[in-house]
């Protein structure tokens, strides 16, 4: 199935325009997966779902946990070119996401649009807050490697901050800052790794310059931050105090919907839905809740075509903001993520 990658800007559609466009595409995806995935068809048939055009809140969802228990594929197995494996606790069963070439390309296109909205139409020198993880098998990625590899294509002069012993390589860092630190450069890392290495461990005395021209993109790992009482605001404050970083973007997404991530607005600190994505909030009985009320996050994406991951009920708690009073003027739902449900297992790229 060839999805319609909308040619307008990421956040250009008003509420009615987005509703018309998105509901049409998400219904086509539901029909596509019903025809192409035997397991998905069995699930929908079991619940008596009527395959007709539906409003967004009536589109069936799959709990994220199902991808750990079943092989959900909507493409011929011989066409699968990549398998993404979710991170999780030791001994837990990971999700396996099967991508064919077309699905992988659409992910890159969408992610490229999102990254362009942050760094512009050019690749920046990139500092990665991690060890150099060599990916031996390019057809199988865990969530951590997939994230690093996926974002690295938007950077150049890739420099990994950590040595093999996970200590900061100050020689490499100072060389990077000497060569690229006077102009904008990209920093990528998982949230708790950024906290450990750029806030707790970084020695100001060992630095020959600061990181003030960096643009930090970070995500995942908030489970560990919650345990030590570090919220997003405190995280940013401590980063600025230690590194002088001002441009800090938190992102949110699932390995089950790779590509259509949500990036935090640098003015209101909310996540914003793009033309590729949407969100609803449900209570414990799966009923919709009003904007401003907390509940389970249901995520929609127009990207998954080789597997039925277009509508997923997560184990995350969030809320849609009632009114958009942000100065950025980007159109799209704004929402917050408050953490995971108490019964959910620890998962994510940097919580392992």
Image (tube, grey):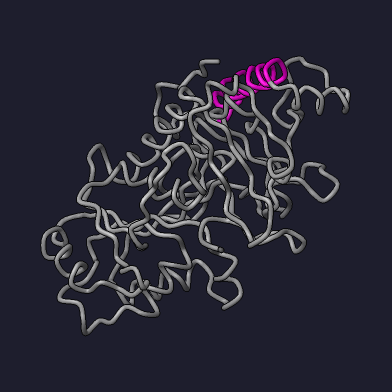
- Name above or below for residue 81 compared with residue 209: above
**Near-viewer residue (292 or 317):** 317
Looking at the image, which residue is at 88% across and 23% down? 48
Image point (29%, 65%), residue name: 161
Looking at the picture, how far across and down is residue 128, in whole percent? 32, 58
Where is 330 relative to 220, above or below?
above
Q: Among all residues in the image, which is located at the extreme bottom?
A: 205
Residue 248 in which image quadrant: bottom left
Please tell me which residue lies in front, 159 or 300. Answer: 159
Residue 58 horizontal/vertical position (percent): 77, 29
Q: Position of residue 339 (x, y in %)?
A: 64, 61
Is the N terminus in the top left, top right, bottom left or bottom right quadrant?
A: top right
Image quadrant in which the C terminus is located: bottom right
Q: Locate residue 342 relative to residue 320 in the image: left or right.
A: right
Q: For residue 104: magenta?
A: no
Q: Residue at x 53, y 37 (%)?
A: 83
Q: Residue furthest front?
A: 136
Residue at the image point whose x is 52% and y is 53% from the top: 270
Image position of 277 (left or right of 60): left
Can you name the residue that lies furthest to the left here? 179
Which stretch did the figure color magenta?
15-36
């Amino acid at each position: 199935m060839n999805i319609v990658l909308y040619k307008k800007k990421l956040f250009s559609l008003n509420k009615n325009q987005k509703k018309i466009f998105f509901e049409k595409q998400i219904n086509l995806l539901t029909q596509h997966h019903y025809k192409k995935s035997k397991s998905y068809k069995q699930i929908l048939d079991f619940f008596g779902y009527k395959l007709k055009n539906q409003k967004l809140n009536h589109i069936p969802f799959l709990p994220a946990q199902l991808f750990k228990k079943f092989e959900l594929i909507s493409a011929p197995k011989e066409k699968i070119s990549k398998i993404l494996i979710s991170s999780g606790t030791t001994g837990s069963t990971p999700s396996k996401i099967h991508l064919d070439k077309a699905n992988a390309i659409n992910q890159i296109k969408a992610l490229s649009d999102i990254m362009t909205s942050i760094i512009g139409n050019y690749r920046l020198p990139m500092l990665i807050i991690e060890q150099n993880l060599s990916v031996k098998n390019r057809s199988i990625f865990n969530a951590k490697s997939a994230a690093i590899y996926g974002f690295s294509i938007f950077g150049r002069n890739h420099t990994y901050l950590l040595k093999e012993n996970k200590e900061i390589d100050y020689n490499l860092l100072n060389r990077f800052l000497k060569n690229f630190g006077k102009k904008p450069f990209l920093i990528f890392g998982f949230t708790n790794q950024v906290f450990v290495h750029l806030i707790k461990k970084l020695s100001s005395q060992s630095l020959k310059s600061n990181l003030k021209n960096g643009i930090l993109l970070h995500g995942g790992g908030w489970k560990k931050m919650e345990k030590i009482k570090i919220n997003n605001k405190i995280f940013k404050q401590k980063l600025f105090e230690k590194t002088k970083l001002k441009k800090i973007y938190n992102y949110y997404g699932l390995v089950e919907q790779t590509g259509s991530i949500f990036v935090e607005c640098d003015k209101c600190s909310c996540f914003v839905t793009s033309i590729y994505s949407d969100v609803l909030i449900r209570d414990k009985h799966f009923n919709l809740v009003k904007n401003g009320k907390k509940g389970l996050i249901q995520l929609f994406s127009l990207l998954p075509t080789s597997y039925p991951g277009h509508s997923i009920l997560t184990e995350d708690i969030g809320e849609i903001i009632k009114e958009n009073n942000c100065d950025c003027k980007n159109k799209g739902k704004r929402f917050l993520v408050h953490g995971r449900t108490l019964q959910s297992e620890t998962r994510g790229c940097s919580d392992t």
